[in-house]
């Protein structure tokens, strides 16, 4: 590796510093798989059976699904007639409790057993105990809708350990993704965590409850948010492992052909849909806008002092895709 060296005149001392570059993900041989990590059935507060819910996602082009009912674990084997090489059901649960008036909802992905919700003497302690309980069940936690009832602040979330995933977009109409009234939106919270040194990746979900009746903005319908994961095979452990590595993008409607990371560049290749136009914003520490592009592909080149770079693509209809932060190293 080349080095930048400064020779101090008159001194026998050389100061060398490696140039900054992106950490390059090891994704050779992998392909994209669309899925949802948060949805409900009649086993908690949804309006449709597990069979009907899973069928909806399969019929709408999803490759994997977690059924995440409140404090209930659906055994995917009971729906084995739906699973095949193109569609997998992976065990999940929304571990649900509260501290005083604060809601604590944490999804357990690919858990091996039902996780009983835990409580503690503090809000952060309650979050942590449930994260740890999900880890003990060999699952991956992701913290759900922090702004729901304004329950979890960025200061709370920064204290939690052993979590790598957080919802930055949730399709339920009452979770306040954009913040308001002095509360930051979830993207602002995400950048605060990242800038503070926490490696955490942003998930989009639909949090669907309503599969029957009207589909509209005031209803918790399916298809509003999802993730697309790069994986070598469509299998639960692989999907969850790569979610926790950040090998995915989140979406509320924009699709990508690829995300390519090289030592100095981050390239976003957008799937063209009809006559839609696209704007890509590259974002760094403290939520600073580093570059805006209307090109496809959109490319960002490292300037030399970035801590991380993430990207957001917005189409002319208002839908978005969130590219996970790519961290830098020397």
Image (cartoon, helix red, strand yellow):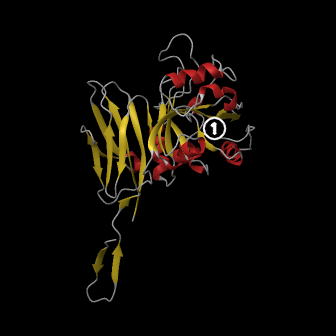
Q: Quadrant of the C terminus?
A: bottom left
Q: Quadrant of the N terminus?
A: bottom left
225, above or below 220, in the image: below
Rendering coords of residue 177 (x, y %): 48, 31
262, above or below 112, in the image: below
- Camera-side residue of 323 and 241: 241
In this figure, which residue is indicated by the disc labeled 1? 106
Number of numbered discs overlaid on the protein picture: 1
Rendering coords of residue 277 (x, y %): 27, 29
Q: Residue at x 65, y 23 (%)?
A: 50
Q: Helix, strand, or loop for circle 1?
A: strand
In the displayed orientation, state which residue is furthest to the top: 213
- Please identify the quarter of the rendering in which residue 252 is found: top left
- Camera-side residue of 55 and 168: 55
**Residue 182: in sight, yes or no?**
no
Q: Residue at x 61, y 49 (%)?
A: 160
- Label 1: few (<14), some or many (≥20) within 10 Å? many
- Camera-side residue of 31 and 296: 31
77, above or below 142, in the image: above
């Amino acid at each position: 590796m080349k080095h930048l060296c400064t020779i101090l005149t008159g001194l026998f001392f050389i100061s060398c510093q490696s140039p900054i570059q992106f950490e390059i993900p090891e994704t050779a041989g992998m392909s994209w798989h669309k899925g949802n990590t948060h949805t409900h059935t009649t086993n908690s507060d949804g309006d449709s059976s597990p069979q009907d819910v899973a069928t909806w996602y399969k019929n709408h082009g999803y490759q994997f699904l977690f059924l995440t009912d409140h404090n209930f674990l659906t055994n995917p084997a009971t729906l084995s007639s739906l699973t095949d090489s193109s569609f997998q059901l992976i065990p999940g649960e929304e571990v649900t409790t509260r501290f005083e008036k604060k809601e604590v909802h944490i999804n357990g992905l690919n858990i091996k057993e039902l996780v009983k919700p835990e409580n503690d003497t503090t809000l952060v302690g309650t979050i942590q105990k449930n994260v740890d309980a999900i880890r003990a069940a060999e699952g991956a936690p992701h913290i759900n809708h922090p702004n729901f009832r304004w329950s979890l602040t960025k200061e709370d979330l920064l204290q939690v350990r052993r979590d790598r995933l957080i919802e930055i977009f949730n399709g339920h109409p009452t979770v306040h993704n954009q913040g308001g009234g002095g509360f930051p939106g979830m993207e602002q919270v995400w950048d605060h965590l990242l800038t503070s040194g926490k490696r955490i990746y942003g998930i989009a979900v639909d949090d669907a409850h309503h599969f029957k009746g009207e589909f509209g903005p005031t209803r918790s319908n399916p298809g509003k948010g999802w993730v697309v994961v790069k994986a070598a095979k469509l299998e639960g452990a692989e999907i969850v492992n790569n979610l926790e590595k950040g090998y995915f993008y989140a979406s509320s409607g924009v699709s990508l052909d690829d995300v390519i990371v090289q030592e100095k560049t981050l390239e976003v290749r957008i799937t063209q849909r009809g006559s839609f136009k696209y704007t890509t914003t590259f974002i760094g520490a403290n939520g600073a806008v580093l570059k805006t592009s209307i090109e496809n592909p959109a490319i960002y080149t490292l300037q030399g002092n970035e801590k991380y770079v993430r990207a957001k693509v917005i189409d002319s209809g208002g839908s978005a895709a969130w590219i996970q932060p790519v961290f830098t190293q020397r």
